[in-house]
Image (cartoon, rainbow, N blue to C red):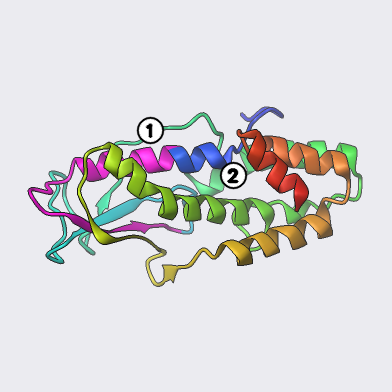
Amino acid sequence: MATPNAHYDFDRFAEYLCVTLAENTARCQLGSSHVKKIRIYTTPDKLWPTRFKVILDNELIAPVQSPLNDDASHDIQYIYRCPSSIPFDSSAASRITEPFIEQAKQLDPDFYRDAWSFNLPGCIPFLLKEMAFRNVTRNLAKQLQHQGVDMTQDFSVQFHDGENYLSFNYDNITQQISQQIHFYLNNAKVKEQAANISFKHPQNRQWFMNL
């Protein structure tokens, strides 16, 4: 059961996700090939990505020891669980959102409960998770390099929801978060509490407070 001190730490979430994906990629049978793309799959019922696919410079999919799924992806198996409280299952998200909502209601009786959800597009936690995924697309290459994985010059990271590729535009997500803050976090103490549970690193908390 979550406590009021449960933290999202979206910044650490992105960092640990990079480590996890790099470890899983390094365990693929890469041979002398360079990695051209990593495709990461999400599903509506999970907050963490569930599967991924490593595409090599010869356009083949890197073999793995574990059985493949029907789409030739394979499950993310070697998982580095970060200290954040973000659960794997969307159905368990209320364990962390509820303590924050209760605190917010104590500080601001007019706080709108439905504005704070992992599962509803447009809500701040949902948008911050998208920002974390964007950070993964930008920082995974550095972690792969640290693991000794060779990549092509045009290496890219893609997120896919099973039907479409997902695009995480920084300016667009930032604008949406800013709008939500102005709608629902008018109480300075509630906004500060949101920043504190959302980020581990002070510079990211300050970014949020400045929106």
Helix, strand or loop at label 2? It is loop
Say if the magenta span includes residue 36: yes
Q: Are marks 1 and 2 in contact (CB under 8 Å)?
A: no
- Kind of residue indicated by mark 2: Ala
The x and y percentages for residue 147 are 26, 37
Farthest residue, direction left: 31
Residue at (43% x, 58% y) in the render? 43
Instruction: Look at the image and give the residue range highlighted in magenta.
Output: 16-43
Q: Quadrant of residue 131?
A: bottom right
> Which disc number belongs to residue 58?
none
Q: Mark 2 highlights which residue?
A: 93
Between 63 and 69, the residue placed more toward the observer is 63
Side (left or right) of 1 relative to 115: left
The x and y percentages for residue 174 are 65, 60
- Kind of residue indicated by mark 1: Tyr
In the rendered structure, which disc, 1 or 2, sits on the residue that comes first in sequence? 1
Between 129 and 157, the residue placed more toward the observer is 157
Q: Mark 1 highlights which residue?
A: 80
Residue at (43% x, 32% y) in the render? 81
Residue at (76% x, 49% y) in the render? 210
Q: Residues within 10 Å of mark 1 (few under 14, many from 20)?
A: some
Between 159 and 104, the residue placed more toward the observer is 159
The x and y percentages for residue 152 are 22, 58
Between 42 and 29, the residue placed more toward the observer is 29
Q: Residues within 10 Å of mark 2 (few under 14, many from 20)?
A: some
Which quadrant of the figure contains the N terminus? top right
Q: CA distance from mark 1 to mark 2?
A: 19 Å
Q: Compared to 30, does 199 lie above or below?
A: above
Q: Compared to 39, does 25 lie above or below?
A: above
Helix, strand or loop at label 1? It is loop
Say if the magenta span includes residue 67: no
Farthest residue, direction right: 109
